[in-house]
Image: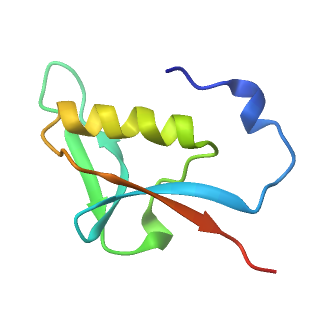
C-alpha cells in the first residue's frame, strides 16, 4: 500500500501509530543497494518512527516480516491534552 501524500498535509492529529518488535520500537530502515538492508530498532518511543495512518503501519509490518522480523505489533499512540 502506498503512502497518500495528502495525509501528510492534514492538520495535526492527536493519534499516531508505532511499531513494536518484541520490546523495542521500529525506527526505520537503513542501508543501500546492493548491500544488506538494516532494520533500526530502538529502546524508547522517542526514537521510534511514527505513522500517520494504520494502513501505513500495516505496510511496515509486511516489510519487516520480509526482512526477518515477523510479529511486529501496531501500537496506537494518543496525545492526551
Name the outermost residue toward the bottom. Answer: 81
Q: Residue 81, percent across and down? A: 82, 80
Identify the residue at image location x=56%, y=47%.
Answer: 51
Identify the residue at image location x=87%, y=47%.
Answer: 11
Give the camera-side residue of 41 and 16.
Answer: 16
With respect to residue 46, does 26 lie above or below? above
Q: Residue 8, percent across and down? A: 73, 37
Q: Is residue 65 left or right of residue 28?
A: left
Give the camera-side residue of 34 and 73.
Answer: 73
Name the outermost residue toward the right. Answer: 11
Identify the residue at image location x=18%, y=44%.
Answer: 70
Identify the residue at image location x=44%, y=61%.
Answer: 48
Q: How is the image coloured?
A: rainbow
Q: Residue 6, percent across and down? A: 77, 27
Q: Residue 13, percent across and down? A: 79, 56
Q: Where is residue 43, by image quadrant?
A: bottom left
With respect to residue 80, does 70 lie above or below? above
Q: Is residue 38 left or right of residue 54?
A: left
With respect to residue 59, does 50 lie above or below? below
Counting every numbered tag in the picture gives 0
Amino acid at each position: 500500500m502506498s503512502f497518500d501524500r495528502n495525509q501528510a498535509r492534514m492538520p495535526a492529529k492527536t493519534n499516531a501509530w508505532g511499531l513494536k518488535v518484541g520490546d523495542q520500537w521500529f525506527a526505520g530502515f537503513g542501508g543501500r543497494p546492493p548491500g544488506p538492508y538494516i532494520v533500526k530498532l530502538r529502546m524508547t518511543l522517542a526514537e521510534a518512527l511514527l505513522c500517520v495512518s494504520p494502513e501505513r503501519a500495516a505496510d511496515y509490518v509486511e516489510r519487516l516480516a520480509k526482512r526477518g522480523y515477523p510479529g511486529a505489533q501496531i501500537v496506537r499512540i494518543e496525545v492526551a491534552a
